Amino acid sequence: MSEKIFIGVAWPYANGPLHLGHIAGAYLPPDIFARYHRTKGNEVLMVSGSDQHGTPITIRAEQEGKTPGEIVTRYHQQFLDSWQKLGISFDLFTSTGTANHAQVAQDIFLTLLKKGYIYKDTVSQPFCLHCQRFLPDRYIEGTCPYCSSSGARGDQCDECGKPINAADLIEPRCSFCDAAPEFKDSEHFFLKLTAFEDRLLAWVKQQTHWRPNVLSFTTRYLEGGLKDRAITRDIDWGIPLPLDGFEKKRLYVWFEAVIGYLSAAKEWAKSSGDEEKWRSFWQGEVKSYYFIGKDNISFHTIIWPAMLMGCDGLNLPYDVPANEFLTIEGKQLSTSRNWAVWLPDYLARYDPDPLRYLLSINMPETADTDFSWREFIRRNNDELVATYGNLVHRVLTFVYRNFDGCVPVPGELDSRSQTIIGSAKDTLSKMDGLLYHCHFREAIRSAMSLAQEANRYLDAKSPWKTIKQDRQAAATALYVAISVISCLRTALYPFLPFSSQRLHEFLGFKGSVEDDGWQPRLPTEGQKLLPPEPLFLKLDGELVDKETSRLGQVHY
Ligand SMILES: [Zn+2]
Ligand SMILES: [Zn+2]
């Protein structure tokens, strides 16, 4: 029976281009997962969108002398373009700037308010006398009250990952002028997180299938005790409160952005012509997965679940497979220091699959991993081209030339041939288990070891030599090799969708790889092949130095 899978993907701030850290952390994993489930015949809804509110946007707009609207439009378009080129197959990539999202966010606010989970209180807000303005959280910096690291902002400490109330920062400073802000009273609405503490803790303790880092971070956080948090701000860029008398306030971005998962599902349902269809991915027998980077864990394992508990009747996350970070050439990725490989820059010059390959086989699932151009080119040349691409190319070109462009008719399979066909089937079923449990790195490694095994098989059988004396033996070996290649087409499809689809067509299959299902589908004898072409390009070793020296230089 087919399963229903809801996939929520972190909402990127529309204030700058995507870089490889984003992709390895939050965007490639859900795409692999979605493609795998679709191939299995499961129903998938994968959504995300641009986060158009919040101070990262207004900061960027002020820096560039543009309106926030101009900034978000530019980057939203760029995101859409990147998804298409990289093959990130969202069912809907929307934005928090839609009327639908504002409506859904305001509805949730009112529901929680009615149920007593949102209340009004007076807080002191940082106000810079020099700049004559209330300072939103990201405009205030200071020392973290939890870990004493110095670069904490008014919303979060990047060092220890904890959310912070601006008033709790030690030695706070205005990030425009460095003056110490005053604190002025202002009326705000609070989410009563304390009301959910026990329920959250009991729920989290049952999530033994979560990644250890996610589970332990969340448990420690909850055991440390929750604080109610202000969910409104004195700003004019954002979603208005659905109440009279608060025209100068907006919903705070972290409160409304997570609601995007629900509003996107509703938007998708509306555009499908069945407005109620979102329910089939939010209620009942559905598993909900949230793919995010580790800096986002508490919003998805504590705050969003608390809001969902408060609303009642909506599914809680089933899993939050947060990834660790990607470093670049051994150094922490930094957008402000421009130490990043920008995705649009990569995609303008290289194919998508080699990047998807490297970030999959080296995915920061359990620990930080590093991206270097040397590694990228080495793995492209030694693994994608030499191990997999050449296997496919030498088999298909040889068969195409010597067997009238058709899959050869095999004789009886000897034990070695039966063994490798068995390995191909085993690999698909082993990967099935790994992918189901979000172990992407191990899954692609299994596929690549099957490719290595196929190369050893071919070396032993050498059909290019035997064809002269024993055409039947050569035909059998080539048929077996094509069968294994056909399994690799499916096995690698979630990771390398572009080259897998091309291979699918070279093998003479119609439609898409997904149509064939997650199962070994062996080509039929005599099946007509298309003229093969290399799947991957070898990259010049000189690119290592060229690309490495561009780091920190290219601005986007
Ligand atoms: Zn100031
Ligand atoms: Zn800290």
Image (spheres, rainbow, N blue to C red):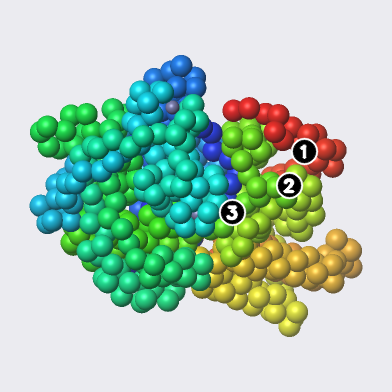
Is there any visible trace of residue 360 in the rendered image? Answer: no
Query: Which mark sits nearer the N-terminus, 3 or 1?
Result: 3
Quarter occupied by residue 410: bottom right
**Horizontal and vertical percent position of residue 146:** 47, 57
The residue lying toward the viewer, choosing from 338 and 531, is 338
* Identity of the residue drawn at 66% across and 56% down: 369
Side (left or right) of 233 relative to 378: left
**Distance of mark 3 from mark 2, alpha carbons?**
13 Å
**Horizontal and vertical percent position of residue 248:** 22, 29
Callout 1: CB less than 8 Å from ligand 2:
no
Tag shown at residue 329? 2
The residue lying toward the viewer, choosing from 501 and 450, is 450
> Quadrant location of the N terminus?
bottom left
Q: Decide: few, some or many residues near mark 3? Use Cα within 10 Å; few <14, some 14-19, many ≥20.
A: many
Tag shown at residue 548? 1
Of the residues shown, which amino acid type is indicated by label 3? Phe
The residue lying toward the viewer, choosing from 145 and 277, is 145
**Distance of mark 2 from mark 1, alpha carbons?**
8 Å
* Identity of the residue drawn at 89% across and 63% down: 465
Of the residues shown, which amino acid type is indicated by label 1? Thr
The residue lying toward the viewer, choosing from 262 and 396, is 262
Side (left or right) of 498 relative to 237: right
Of the residues shown, which amino acid type is indicated by label 2? Glu
**Horizontal and vertical percent position of residue 110:** 14, 47
Side (left or right) of 423 relative to 140: right
Please determine whether, in this image, residue 265 is positioned above or below residue 551: below
**Distance of mark 3 from mark 1, alpha carbons?**
20 Å
- Circles 2 and 1, Cβ within 8 Å, touching? The answer is yes
The residue beneath circle 3 is 325
- Circles 3 and 1, Cβ within 8 Å, touching? The answer is no
